[in-house]
Amino acid sequence: MSKKKRPRLVIAGTGSGVGKTTVTLGLMAAFARRLKAVQGFKIGPDYIDPSYHTVVTGRPSRNLDTWMMPPEHMKEIFLRGSAGADLSLIEGVMGMYDGKDPLSDEGSTADIAIRLESPVILVVNIHSMARSAAAVVLGYQRFTPRVRVAGVIVNRAGSEGHYRLAKAAIEQECGIPVVGWLKRDEGLAIPERHLGLVPAMERGELDPLFETLADSVEKTVDLEALLGLAEEAPLLEEGSQSLFEPRQVSTEEAPPVIAVARDAAFNFYYPENFDLLQLYGAELRFFRPLEGEEVPEDADGLMIGGGFPEEFTDRLAREERVKESVRNAIKKGLPTFAECGGYMYLCEKLVTAKGKEYPMVGVIPATVQMKGRLAALGYREVRALSDTILLEKGETARGHEFHYSSLTHHQPHPPFAYESQGRRGLHSEGFAKENLLAGYTHLHFASNPLMVKRWLELCRRSRRKFDKNV
């Protein structure tokens, strides 16, 4: 097994809201200005922050997670994603030690940093403190000594003098450098993350913010010192088990075509899910429902991911030809997987938080009601309640649930897809009927790669059956 050089830093925080994303994006933009190839990663299942990373760096950002997939696969995803990059910046999640279990570091930023042997830059909000910042940093250093806290960036300093007070205390008491600071400036705040973010980035509306972040970082952060710390990261050894080993796929027939809805309404996809589909022999064909693009006629399977359909209800409802193409594809038996936003789109109607109703595709007899607050959030392990296009009855997969809506089935005994296990216990979830599988849970295919193999085999069989009937 060979070892790989991967200059890298984990950008961790003392808690949510301290400025991890602000600092990470500022660093990415500043290094990109220096013509560095920067690879972004996000710890945990989040889709939003990686979308920022991708826009700023020009490279697809990837999720690193040790709960949704085995740790050796997480490491492999890091090594594959960072190939060819001058620097990898890994944005943490919540506080550095917050993960799946309050009694362990499992799934936390600290867990990923240890497994990747990565230096950590700790972001500390020093608003209303000076010497006390040293006590905070010291606690994070000593809590799990295997984590190498290599430096600190202080955020929301009232002035350069305030920054220097905190810097002197931290460096004296903790023995590590404070490599920079950001001032208290509401203009540097990242906008609301869950509504309309992706379309705003696609239109370039956030480019001025990214430029401002780069300007701020260049003025007050020692970028050369950070590069030096990243270069100190040890070589990483490749694992013995590969998720992405080349697979033997049939060459006797054309590859199955998976039509993937991808636009501003449907854009929450894990890159590795696409990678695994292609590895097992699929050809991905993207189409944009919002732009009036119908399901491609040569599709052998259909995937409709999550996103923001509630932001585009009027446009989605107006595109009757698109809806009809989706209905016809599912009715003829096209193996279809829809999750979260895609699940909502396949229902009969979507009701906004203000009570306005919009007709959707209508293949699932259910109504979606938007809420004014978060309806579900957290990791999920799902167990199939029947044989589906991805899972046989009793098989499990892991993923994440995040939505602001609730769904009401119109049937007294709907064909639920999964038994879903989360922090609040078990509940039945989703919809499974014939070759349609849909649900709120975003599944990560790395948690059970057999899902990909089963789906594509079904796509091949369905194509042969359809061709024969024609």
Image: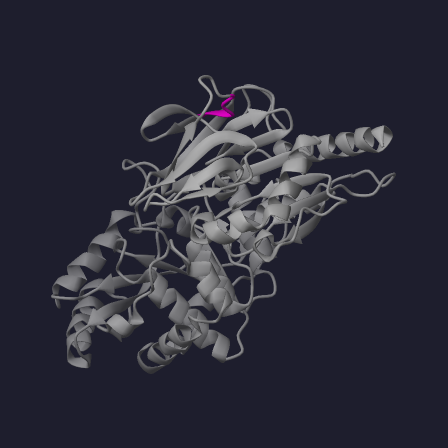
Q: Is residue 417 magenta?
A: yes
Numbered range of the magenta stretch: 415-419
Residue occupying the far top of the picture? 413
Residue 417 appears anywhere in the view: yes
Relative depth, front residue between 155 and 335: 335
Relative depth, front residue between 238 and 413: 413
List x then y, in percent, for residue 204: 48, 71
Left/right of residue 355 with respect to residue 417 in the rendered view: left
List x then y, in percent, for residue 364: 53, 31
Relative depth, front residue between 420 and 116: 420
How would you classify the magenta stretch by its main secondary structure? loop
Q: Is residue 418 above or below residue 241?
A: above
Left/right of residue 267 with respect to residue 42 in the rendered view: right
List x then y, in percent, for residue 202: 51, 65
Q: Quadrant of the C terminus?
A: top right
Q: Residue at x 58, y 58 (%)?
A: 4
Q: Is residue 455 above or below residue 313?
A: above
Q: Is residue 187 magenta?
A: no
Relative depth, front residue between 419 and 183: 419
Q: Is residue 338 above or below residue 112?
A: above
Q: Residue at x 44, y 66 (%)?
A: 230
Residue 8 appears anywhere in the view: no
Q: Residue at x 63, y 53 (%)?
A: 2
List x then y, in percent, for residue 391: 59, 26
